[in-house]
């Protein structure tokens, strides 16, 4: 439990624990969730037994119902660029990074520095708490949160299996990573071998559906 980050039934892999927030932004822009995903990933630098069973990199191609694509990449590898952001390309222009919108010729259409803006994390809490105090339950984001979580899990299923995984089939998978019961004495389903190494997903062999 103290090493929870490296076990999927507790953390979900870093694509679920951390990268989910970027995937959530993608779904917000698309006003929906992907219908399928394919990708690749693995363990190159975090290979020791202390790293449990998760990958250290993922790349996923998500496809939405209208045929548009979202390309997602995340990694935990020392010595590589540390970047957590999103970029979007549309028919009339692109948003190469937060606060900037350009046309396809590179001309800036809109720029927001944000440095003089109030703290957005504080503002969202102020607005939420004010609405609750007034009995205005207008921020119903549970479904969006569930879709973001499933989007991240879908990506992990794609990288672990090496297969194209459809949303509906993933959602109805009978495979459970949880112990049979939640109890301090419960035995996890993923157990180490005699040398202390845990089983690692192998694309082309691991089943996720």
Image (cartoon, helix red, strand yellow):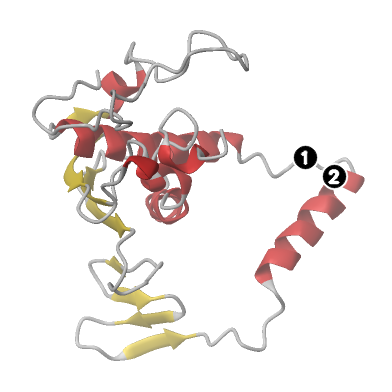
Tell me residue 118's x, y (percent).
72, 78
Residue with the mark numbered 2: 132
Name the element at disc 1. loop
> Which residue does the image show at 11% across and 24% down from the upper left?
205
Q: Quadrant of the C terminus?
A: top left
**Above-or-below relation of 172 to 41:** above
**Above-or-below relation of 174 to 34:** above
The answer to whether marks 1 and 2 mark residues whose Cβ atoms lie closer than 8 Å is: yes
**Distance in Å between CA atoms under marks 1 and 2:** 6 Å
Q: Residue furthest top?
A: 180
> Which residue does the image show at 37% across and 66% down from the upper left?
86
**Based on the displayed image, in which of its 4 quarters is residue 92 positioned?**
bottom left
Local crowd at mark 2 within 10 Å, few (<14), some, or many (≥20)?
few
Tell me residue 42's x, y (percent).
20, 46
* Nearest to N terminus: mark 1 or mark 2: 2
Residue 32 can be seen, yes or no: no
Q: Residue furthest front?
A: 195
Tell me residue 90's x, y (percent).
26, 66
> Which residue does the image show at 26% across and 47% down from the upper left?
47
Local crowd at mark 1 within 10 Å, few (<14), some, or many (≥20)?
few
Name the element at disc 2. helix
Rendered image: mark on residue 69: none
Tell me residue 53's x, y (percent).
32, 36
Residue with the mark numbered 1: 137
């Amino acid at each position: 439990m103290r090493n929870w980050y490296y076990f999927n039934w507790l953390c979900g892999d870093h694509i679920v624990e951390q990268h989910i927030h970027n995937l959530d932004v993608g779904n917000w822009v698309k006003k929906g969730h992907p219908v399928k995903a394919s990708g690749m990933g693995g363990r190159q630098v975090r290979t020791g037994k202390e790293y449990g069973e998760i990958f250290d990199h993922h790349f996923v191609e998500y496809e939405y119902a209208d045929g548009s694509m979202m390309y997602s990449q995340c990694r935990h590898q020392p010595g590589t660029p540390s970047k957590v952001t999103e970029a979007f390309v549309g028919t009339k222009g692109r948003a190469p990074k937060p606060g900037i919108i350009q046309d396809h010729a590179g001309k800036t259409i809109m720029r927001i520095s944000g440095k003089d803006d109030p703290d957005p994390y504080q503002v969202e809490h102020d607005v939420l708490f004010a609405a609750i105090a007034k009995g205005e339950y207008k921020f119903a984001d549970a479904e969006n949160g569930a879709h973001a979580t499933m989007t991240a899990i879908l990506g992990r299923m794609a990288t672990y299996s090496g297969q194209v995984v459809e949303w509906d089939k993933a959602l109805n998978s009978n495979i459970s990573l949880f112990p049979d019961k939640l109890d301090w004495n419960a035995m996890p389903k993923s157990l180490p071998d005699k040398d202390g190494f845990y089983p690692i997903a192998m694309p082309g062999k691991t089943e996720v559906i």
